Amino acid sequence: MRIFSLQESRIGGIIPAYRAGAQCRINFHYFMPMDFISTYAAALSPSLTLAVTNRAKEMKAKGEQIFGIAGGEPDKDTPDNVKQAAINALEQGATKYTPSAGLLELRRAISRKLEKDNNLKYTEDQICVCSGAKPAVYSALRATISPGDEVIIPSPYWVSYPSMVQLCGGTPVFVETKAENGWKITAEEFEGAMTPRTKMIILNTPHNPTGAVYNEDELRAVGEVAVEEDILILSDEIYEHLVYGEAKHVSIASLSQELYDLTITINGFSKSYAMTGWRLGYSAAPEAIAKAIRLIQDHTASNATSFAQYGAIEALTGDQSFVSDLREEYDMRRQYVYERLQHMPKVKVVEPQGAFYFFLDMSETGMSSLSLCERLLERYKVAAVPGIAFGNDQAIRISYCTSLDVLKEALDRLEEFCRKLG
């Protein structure tokens, strides 16, 4: 492992630093004694997704035209009825603390949503509203993971899962998934990765970065192993409404009482309702775990923003046409991008069934994902995310949550780049 200074890790320095090797960490000693920094914080790696995004923004601020296909947030604005609900709440004085687990009315709305959409019955006391799905994941891990516990994470993975596990003193155990299996972990792979210290598996469906969607049979097979070995499941379902074609979203906790008793379900408002900046997510869990999550929230975030919670109530209970329109728009873009990618040299692509990403196997280029994305950005003005951020250095992630005009130009440039490689 090579150690880099904090200065080296800043904007414009993270990517070159990573090129020296996939594993690295920041050395805070350049600014203060290492004794002041916890071992957990010192072990963290910089976020490559933020590095690429920030570098692209820096170039754009200098007047360069950048074609960004790296983003992880919808390009649509929050629905007007949701914004108005928050405005009304502000005007009516909803500027005070709420219960740490969230407004009772919001938790009841979430409870009704889970029963209607996911066939899951949770009381309001089993639900905790957090300042985003990311804090919901972290609080759930804090409530369940102790030092020495192992957490199985299918790879590729969302960038923050391993770091969150490490911050809880746990050990991430990566299971490499295969493109020929649709980038999904199998029951056999899950079972083969377990040890006596295995405490949890993290499932993300629809999946970031691959767009994979687990069907009911696949979830049942993985779930049977979890039940047999008494392994917790953290099910991150933040992209649940963005599924396409014949794919259907299934919540693993809905498949049996045994799975319900082992599962923490995570969801939020960022993707389906274009509410990324609102920072609202939630967890739904068995009673004992839910109580622990609430206690952690009591002593950390206190509560999610009060007036934003009123917007969330409207998002769940108001007109849902925004969600269906968003899904339809993204499906059209998905099909366009898939058609283009299938005819590009040096690119291997698996058709995604959900979310708004493609995870492209670029191994035929002979380049690392870091070098590839750096060249794409600097020479072709296209911002993509290196796959090493998700545990795979032979791939890149691109997003289609941007306009068709931007997608067309970015794909034209990506194709030109690939063809010039010969």
Image: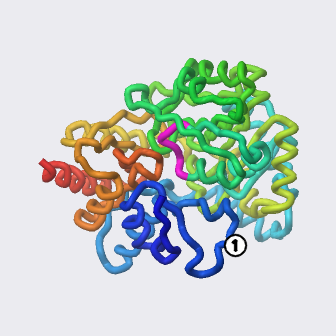
In-image side of 161 versus 232 (left or right): left
Query: How many marks overall?
Result: 1
In the image, taking residue 272 as reference, residue 115 lies left or right, namely right
Residue 314 visible, this angle = no
Out of 62 and 319, give the one closest to the viewer. 62
Q: In the rendered view, how is the structure colored?
A: rainbow
Question: Residue at the spot x=64%, y=45% of the render?
Answer: 171
Q: Nearer the viewer, residue 121 or 183?
A: 183
- Could you tell me which residue is drawn at 60 percent across and 58 percent down? 80
- The stretch in magenta equals 154-159
State the residue position of label 1: 35
Whether residue 332 is visible to the viewer of this picture, yes or no, is yes
Residue type highlighted by circle 1: Asp
Q: Quadrant of residue 67?
A: bottom left
Q: Residues within 10 Å of mark 1 (few under 14, many from 20)?
A: few
- Residue 130, given in percent of the width and then of the height, sits at 74, 54
Whether residue 22 sits left or right of residue 377 in the image: it is right
- Asked whether residue 115 is drawn in magenta, I would say no
Residue at the image point whose x is 64% and y is 56% from the top: 81
State the residue in front, 250 or 115.
250
Main SS, magenta region, reads: loop
Residue 152 position (above or below residue 74): above
Considering only vertical position in the picture, is 253 above or below 82?
above
SS of the residue under disc 1: helix
Which residue is rendered at x = 72% and y = 44% of the image? 148
Locate residue 45, reporting x and y percent.
54, 60
Give x and y (percent) for residue 152. 61, 36
Determine which quarter of the picture holds residue 34.
bottom right
